[in-house]
Image: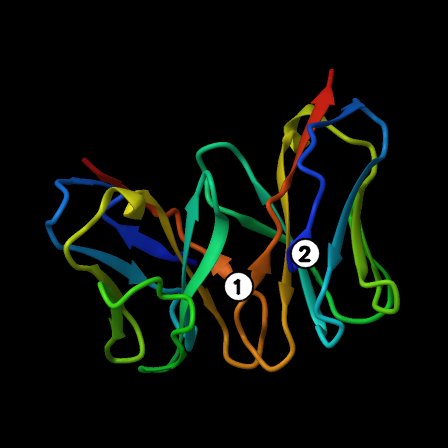
Amino acid sequence: QKEVEQNSGPLSVPEGAIASLNCTYSDRGSQSFFWYRQYSGKSPELIMSIYSNGDKEDGRFTAQLNKASQYVSLLIRDSQPSDSATYLCAVMPSGTYKYIFGTGTRLKVLA
Amino acid sequence: GAGVSQSPSNKVTEKGKDVELRCDPISGHTALYWYRQSLGQGLEFLIYFQGNSAPDKSGLPSDRFSAERTGGSVSTLTIQRTQQEDSAVYLCASSLGGRLEQYFGPGTRLTVT
């Protein structure tokens, strides 16, 4: 079992729809979770961090964390073609400062 | 302000040669990380620095890989006797002391021929 799992996609959504990206992790003690966006040929760009169970909103983005289910998700409201990218979930295992990344979900927003 | 910078942006080298990759973190960021990203492996952690010391080197794939950081700022990742499987994008990230969010540089694309 991989430490951080994401569906590779592509996930295709129409412009204006909500995109839902999911991530599961295996280290039950993990406390810190991050979502990055990576455009083709570019480096990862931090979207959000989340540390507590529940929802955290930032503009069109909402991160959701459920530690009991070892599940973290990212919702993108009013999706735009410019949101088309690979979304990486990163988990910081307990007792470390490194990230373990999922392989990413490729999102395509269709105009 | 300026973000993380890395040099060179691209490096092509012959198998068996040594290479040095440089990272300049965001000013004031005390933590520095090296990752690499390849098609088959995704994004993998290599090493973490806090100041000039490296408390976590667990991701370095072999003793051909080493890294140092001087003055609590610039870091150099050295790969000796490069192999074709070392071909990847090497990414550096930094974070502010007491914060866990990491900010990535543009990366160095290494191609070993």
Q: CA distance from mark 2 to mark 1?
A: 26 Å
Q: Which residue is mark 2?
A: A1
Residue appearing at x 52%, y 69% in the figure: A98
Q: Does A28 sit left or right of B5 as displayed?
A: right
- Where B88 falls versus B80 (above or below)? above
* Image quadrant where one finds the N terminus of chain A: bottom right
Residue in front for this viewpoint, B37 or A41: B37
Residue in front for this viewpoint, A100 or A43: A100
- Where A10 falls versus B53 (above or below)? above
Q: Which residue is mark 1?
A: B102
> How crowded is the residue under tag 1: few (<14 C-alpha within 10 Å), some, or many (20+)?
many
Q: Secondary structure at mark 2?
A: loop
Q: Does A31 sit left or right of B52 as displayed?
A: right
Residue appearing at x 59%, y 72% in the figure: B100
Residue appearing at x 54%, y 35% in the figure: A39
| Three-letter residue code for mark 1 | Gln
Q: Nearer the viewer, mark 2 or mark 1?
A: 2
In the rendered structure, find residue A107 and report the number of the disc placed on it: none
Q: Does B96 sit left or right of B106 as displayed?
A: right
Q: Does B24 sit left or right of A94 as displayed?
A: left
Q: Secondary structure at mark 1?
A: loop
| Three-letter residue code for mark 2 | Gln
Residue A19, percent from left and from top? 81, 35
* Image quadrant where one finds the C terminus of chain A: top right
Q: Chain under label 2?
A: A
